[in-house]
């Protein structure tokens, strides 16, 4: 029997209607073709299997080679990558799903072996993050970055704009800007990583500038009603920190709301960790933002239902449960048991732990 909750109601997100309020969160899987960073042959199956989610958000996809920080992550900057993603969007649409691509520049969370000619990764300031990346088949310390020159920043904005154009060409329903988890846009926004003294450093307004300029450029290309963004106000992921996150994010969200973005996707707490890692008023962001609020981090059926009933969010993003449960929506509806995930197959590999998790329909009856 199916459980009654707002989770399974349709939702109008800009010009598209979602079949339910479940969002598949972006999940890095490191299975793109080495060298070309085209989504692999299995990617269309993987996303197609999960098309019953109201909205699928792809794994983060770099907007340029410079934007790559991990081995075998897909890009959205070459013709071959666009063609590879087209197979994914076709499969999802064939099955009645909706899909956005997440646009990514990792900034300092990279390694010289992933950069053209072994160059240093770029960042707002030349501060090395304490952290590791996945490269050459294993984990290695991230490389020392160099500070971006003021003259290079328009090029970064253009990379996001071009990636957006490519995403629409590849058939995506929209794009999500990756402004979270200690990557480039968040590195600029947070004072732990940004020590600049020019127009992109110092005050909250200056540090928020790049995230808002990128958002404006993406909106100009895709339309505000097909542009979302992901933020993580208090996550410590990738050695990121800020001395006053509430004031910073209240300002950022005011700016995003003025641009009329279709949704705000918020990692509440530590990415993949405790939800209560630091005090933060998420309701303040919800109030300030005119579009849809997507809540993320550690949600299960009960918490999702409670938050939707309280009107504290419009959509709920689930991450790891979607890895191991292609039919997560159906399982939650029926109150069925969930498959456990296999951590060893999260990053890299082939079909095992990627496209071979069973659905309810495929399981023998009790």
Image (spheres, helix red, strand yellow):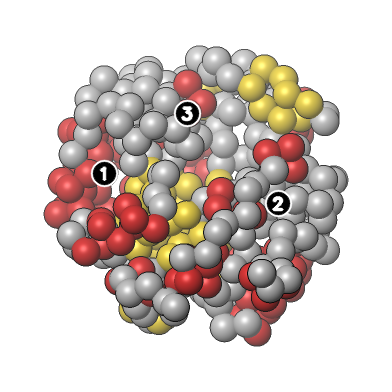
- Name the residue that disc number 2 marks: 74
Would you say 365 lies left or right of 222 here? right
Q: Secondary structure at mark 2?
A: loop
Q: Residue at position x 71%, y 30% from top?
A: 134
The vertical placement of 50 against 124, above or below, is below
Residue located at (55% from left, 15% from top): 130
Residue ID at (30%, 61%): 305
Q: CA distance from mark 2 to mark 3?
A: 21 Å
- Left or right of residue 255: residue 88: right
Which dot, 2 or 3, sits closer to the camera? 3
Depth check, front residue: 292 or 268: 268
Q: Quadrant of residue 194?
A: top left
Q: Residue at x 67, y 27 (%)?
A: 133
Quarter of the image for residue 190 reads top left
On the picture, is 175 further left or further right than 363? left
Numbered badge on residue 252: 1
Which quadrant would the N terminus be assigned to in this image?
A: bottom left
Closer to the N terminus: mark 2 or mark 3?
A: 2
Task: Categorize mark 3 by other alpha carbons within 10 Å: few (<14), some (14-19), many (20+).
Answer: some
Q: Which mark is residue 165?
A: none
Q: Nearer the viewer, residue 232 or 308?
A: 308
Residue 102, can we see it? no
Real-space Cα separation, disc 3 to disc 1, in angstroms: 19 Å
- Where is residue 333? Give x, y as percent: 45, 71
Residue under label 3: 237
Q: Nearer the viewer, mark 3 or mark 1?
A: 3
Q: Bin the neighbour count of mark 2 within 10 Å (Cα to Cα): few under 14, some 14-19, many 20 and up.
A: many
Sequence-first tag of 2 and 1 = 2
């Amino acid at each position: 029997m199916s459980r009654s909750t707002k989770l399974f109601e349709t939702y109008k997100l800009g010009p598209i209607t979602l079949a339910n309020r479940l969002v598949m969160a972006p999940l890095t899987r490191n299975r793109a073709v080495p060298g070309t960073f085209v989504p692999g042959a299995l990617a269309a199956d993987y996303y197609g299997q999960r098309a019953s989610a109201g909205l699928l958000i792809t794994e983060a996809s770099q907007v340029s080679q410079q934007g790559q920080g991990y081995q075998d992550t897909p890009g959205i900057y070459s013709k071959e990558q666009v063609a590879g993603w087209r197979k994914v969007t076709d499969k999802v649409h064939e099955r009645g799903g909706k899909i956005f691509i997440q646009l990514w520049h990792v900034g300092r969370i990279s390694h010289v072996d992933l950069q053209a000619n072994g160059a240093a990764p770029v960042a707002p300031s030349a501060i090395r993050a304490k952290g590791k990346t996945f490269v050459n088949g294993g984990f290695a310390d991230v490389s020392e970055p160099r500070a971006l020159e003021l003259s290079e920043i328009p090029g970064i904005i253009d990379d996001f704009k071009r990636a957006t154009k490519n995403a629409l060409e590849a058939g995506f329903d929209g794009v999500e800007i990756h402004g979270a988890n200690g990557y480039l846009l968040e590195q600029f926004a947070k004072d732990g990583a940004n020590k600049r003294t020019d127009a992109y450093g110092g005050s909250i307004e200056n540090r928020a500038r790049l995230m808002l300029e990128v958002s404006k450029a993406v909106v100009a290309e895709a339309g505000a009603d097909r542009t979302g963004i992901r933020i993580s106000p208090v996550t410590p992921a990738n050695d990121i920190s800020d001395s006053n996150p509430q004031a910073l994010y209240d300002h950022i969200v005011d700016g995003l709301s003025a641009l009329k973005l279709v949704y705000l996707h918020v990692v509440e707490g530590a990415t993949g960790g405790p939800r209560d890692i630091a005090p933060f008023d998420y309701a303040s962001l919800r109030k300030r933002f005119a579009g849809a609020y997507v809540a993320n981090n550690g949600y299960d059926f009960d918490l999702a239902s409670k938050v939707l009933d309280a009107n504290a969010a419009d959509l709920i993003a689930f991450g790891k449960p979607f890895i191991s449960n292609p039919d997560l929506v159906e399982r939650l509806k029926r109150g069925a048991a969930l498959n456990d995930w296999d951590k060893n197959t999260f990053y890299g590999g082939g079909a095992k732990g990627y496209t071979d998790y069973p659905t309810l329909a495929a399981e023998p009856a009790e």
